Amino acid sequence: MQTKFVAVECDVYCEWNNQPPRYRAYVNNELFIERTWIWKDAYLREKFQIQALPGQYQIRYEPLDGAKITLENWKVHSGPAGINQQGNLVIHNESS
């Protein structure tokens, strides 16, 4: 079985006070990013580019400093995949 390339995106909102919080994003249990949130009253459109075998994957966020992370508008930008609003990604075997 061959790996497939997919790109998915979502809007990330973060509520925080005091110091800018750090957060992590995982695909299954693999750390994909770790960042510090520096924006007030704004959201970030996050894009994941994934090269993986067909199957099921969970994309999840983990706030590290007590912030509240909200994810909305998940969508597949390109590639043979589908995603729901909880970040559950399915990469399909077919090319289209």
Image (cartoon, grey):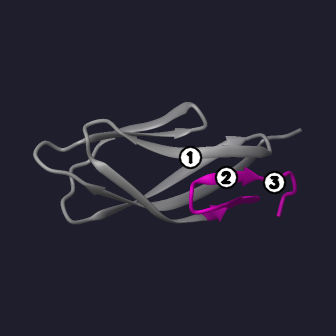
Q: Say the numbered circle drawn on residue 59.
A: 1
Q: Position of residue 1 (x, y in %)?
A: 89, 38
For the C terminus, the image quarter is bottom right
Q: Magenta span has 10? A: no
Structural distance between the alpha carbons of marks 3 and 2 = 10 Å
Query: Is residue 44 found left or right of 28 in the rendered image?
Result: left
Q: Earlier in the sequence, mark 2 or mark 1?
A: 1
Return the residue at label 3: 92
Query: Is residue 24 found left or right of 38 in the rendered image?
Result: right
Mark 3 lies on a secondary structure that is loop
Q: Position of residue 70 (x, y in %)?
A: 39, 58
Task: Kindly identify the residue that appears in the image at 14 percent across and 50 percent down.
Answer: 17
- Give the magenta part as a residue range: 76-96
**Local crowd size for mark 2, using a 10 Å CA cut-off: few (<14), some (14–19), many (≥20):** many
Q: Earlier in the sequence, mark 1 or mark 3?
A: 1
Q: Are marks 1 and 3 in contact (CB under 8 Å)?
A: no
Return the residue at label 2: 89
Task: Kindly identify the residue that appears in the image at 31 percent across and 51 percent down.
Answer: 68
Task: Kindly identify the residue that appears in the image at 18 percent across and 60 percent down.
Answer: 40
Q: Quadrant of residue 86?
A: bottom right
Structural distance between the alpha carbons of marks 2 and 1 = 7 Å
Q: Nearer the viewer, mark 3 or mark 2?
A: 2
Q: Nearer the viewer, mark 1 or mark 3?
A: 1
* Amino acid at dot 3: His
Query: Is residue 28 found left or right of 72 in the rendered image?
Result: right
Mark 2 lies on a secondary structure that is strand
Q: Say the numbered circle drawn on residue 74.
A: none
Structural distance between the alpha carbons of marks 1 and 3 = 16 Å
Query: Is residue 4 found left or right of 78 in the rendered image?
Result: right
